[in-house]
Image (tube, rainbow, N blue to C red):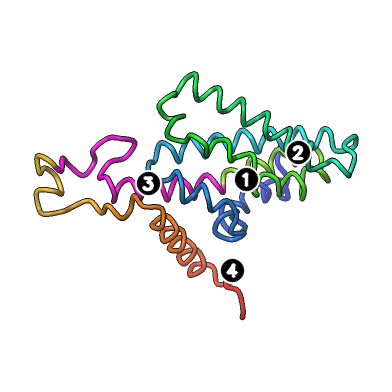
Amino acid sequence: MALLSKKDTNLLLDPLSDNNPITIQVLGICSALAITAELKASIVMAISVLFVMGMGNVVISLMRNIIPSKIRIIVQLVVVATLVIIVDQVLKAFAYELSKTLSVFVGLIITNCIIMGRFEAFALANGTWRSFLDGIGNAAGYGVILVIIGFFRELLGSGTLLGYKVLGDPIAKTGLYSIGYENNGFMLLSPMALIVVGLIIWVQRSRNKALIEEN
């Protein structure tokens, strides 16, 4: 028997394109605006959400038959808060400077509507394995968009990727800077993240006409 059925595979792949949490469901926009000026921060946030959503879906699925309906939201918040605290402490222990860059935005994972939405819509009604796949798939879809935004914002805004100068030295005027290229400082401002998201949505819908909503 194959490890992943067709339905299981769809749980992993659909959020990467046709049902992406950011570009299709328009969820989790706040972090896309806030922490994507640097590619490294985008990657770390994506990994953090991957851990929290994957493990959180598993825990909620395991507890789904014993969680009283009236307090299910509180239980979900406790689970996600616990996982976020673990992420925050690991970042402070092994990547302190980056943890300061992400600062309050790691804590805001607790209220990320994508995570709470998957807990409520999927993990409470499905088994552990499928819930895990759903969490990983949606977190990956979210993370891919963050990484794409972070890539273009850092590259065009600072001329670097992961802190390394890839377009040359703007002071010594080497590389592209030697022919008059200048960094676009606007790319480092939050509104530009929204514009990049808009461009991604436009490209996605131009390639798949089924995603275009009818008025």
Residue identifier under label 3: 151
Mark 3 or 4: the one toward you = 3
Question: Which residue appears farthest toward the top when viewing the image?
Answer: 93
> Is disc 4 placed on a helix, strand or loop?
helix
How many discs appear? 4
Query: Disc 3 or 4, which lies upstream in sequence?
Result: 3
Chain part drawn in magenta: 141-170
| Residue at 59% in and 37% down | 50
In terms of depth relative to the viewer, which is nearer, 39 or 3?
39
Amino acid type at image mark 2: Gln
Amino acid type at image mark 3: Phe
In terms of depth relative to the viewer, which is nearer, 118 or 75?
75
Query: Disc 2 or 4, which lies upstream in sequence?
Result: 2
Q: Main secondary structure of the magenta part?
A: helix
> Is disc 1 placed on a helix, strand or loop?
loop
Q: Is residue 102 left or right of residue 176?
A: right
| Separation of residues labelled 4 and 1 (CA atoms) | 24 Å
Residue identifier under label 1: 112
Picture layout, residue 200 above or below residue 171: below
Percent across and percent down for residue 172 are 9, 39
Query: Disc 1 or 3, which lies upstream in sequence?
Result: 1
| Separation of residues labelled 3 and 2 (CA atoms) | 32 Å
Q: Are marks 1 and 2 in contact (CB under 8 Å)?
A: no
Q: Which mark is residue 76?
A: 2
Q: Which mark is residue 211?
A: 4
> Is disc 3 placed on a helix, strand or loop?
helix
Identify the image quadrant of the C terminus: bottom right
Q: Residues within 10 Å of mark 2 (few under 14, many from 20)?
A: many
